[in-house]
Amino acid sequence: MRSIDLIRLFVLAAIWGASFLFLRIVAPVLGAVWTAEVRVALAGIAMLLFIAATGRRMHFRANWKPFIVLGTLNSALPFALFSYAALTLPAGYSAILNATSPLWGALVGAAVLGERLTARKLSGLIIGVAGVAFLVRLGPVAFTTDVAMAALACIAAALCYGLAGAYSKKASAAIAPPLMATGSQLGAALVLLPFLPLSPIRAELTPFIALIAALLALLCSAVAYFIYFRLIADLGPTKALTVTFLIPLFALGWGALFLQEAISVNTLIGCALVVLATWLVVFQPAPLVISVPEQGRR
């Protein structure tokens, strides 16, 4: 891996780790739905302006369906669910639960795409579930009904990412990734729009909250997506997924540094189990190739 790719990988992990910190600041003010809407709408507009500046066309008429479906599964629902969880859970908790996305992706791939569920993937799923249970039950936050509901919201969001991955493989492979990312953000904004009246703003919107909301949208969605797609182009999708292992570490660090969120030994154990499980699922060993000597001519 080149030095520039390694730098991009750590920068992306730091940005996406910070998104959970920003959610902890913004969601108590804007509420879950408004937080998600501001994030996808601002990001979508910024990304659309960038796409237009490069002279590319979105082809909304032809691509509106995958934009809406992927926007719902990959942004609208998970962003709203993580925003809801941010009302209760520390940033590190949400990031660790978010790291289970490849585990659910493996299950969805087996159920929807017919992908083989190997013993390695099954062991990863079991370890991942154990890590989540360990974190939620024995972490520094007392186990309550609200904590359980918030954790379930994070798991549902991670499942949405798994469904989005399966849908993307089946229905949107023909659309260039930057166009798909931009269209899905705009599609997510349209999906969330009717639900805004049901989620009133919870507190006063100050300039500081507006700044953090803008960073959440422009930095953690728009800029982050373009860095991620560059990593996929340079390294391939599997190596680019290594960012998943780094995000919880940055989220734990940001939460402790800026919000004084506790990091206990149990938190680190739960994090380690989830990261190990994700590694088992994401990085499959290459098949053993046995070279057979060419037989002589008869």
Image (spheres, rainbow, N blue to C red):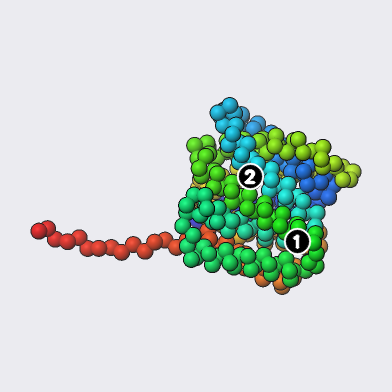
Using the numbered discs, state the Cα–Cα distance from disc 1 to disc 2 in whole angstroms: 22 Å
Say the numbered circle drawn on residue 288. none
Relative vertical location of residue 110 with respect to residue 143 in this rendering, above or below: above
- At x 70% / y 40%, what residue is drawn? 40
Mark 1 crowdedness (10 Å alpha carbons): few <14, some 14-19, many ≥20: some
**Which numbered disc flags the more N-terminal residue, 1 or 2?**
2
Q: Quadrant location of the C terminus?
A: bottom left
Check disc 2 and give the amino acid type.
Answer: Leu
- At x 47% / y 62%, what residue is drawn? 118
Q: Secondary structure at mark 1?
A: helix
Check disc 1 and give the amino acid type.
Answer: Ala
Relative vertical location of residue 158 with respect to residue 63 in this rendering, above or below: below
Mark 2 crowdedness (10 Å alpha carbons): few <14, some 14-19, many ≥20: many
Can residue 43 be seen here? The reply is no
Can residue 96 be seen here? The reply is yes
Relative vertical location of residue 241 with respect to residue 40 in this rendering, above or below: below
Horizontal side of 55 relative to 32 (left or right) equals: left
Closest to the observer: 80 or 194? Answer: 194
How far across and how far down the image is residue 195, in percent? 77, 38
The answer to whether the residue labelled 1 contacts the one labelled 2, judged by CB atoms less than 8 Å apart, is no
Relative vertical location of residue 44 with respect to residue 98 in this rendering, above or below: above
- At x 67% / y 51%, what residue is drawn? 157
Q: Residue furthest right?
A: 204
Horizontal side of 295 relative to 141 (left or right) equals: left
Horizontal side of 56 relative to 186 (left or right) equals: left
How far across and how far down the image is residue 112, in percent? 52, 49
Say the numbered circle drawn on residue 148. 1
Residue bearing mark 2: 73
How far across and how far down the image is residue 297, in percent? 12, 58
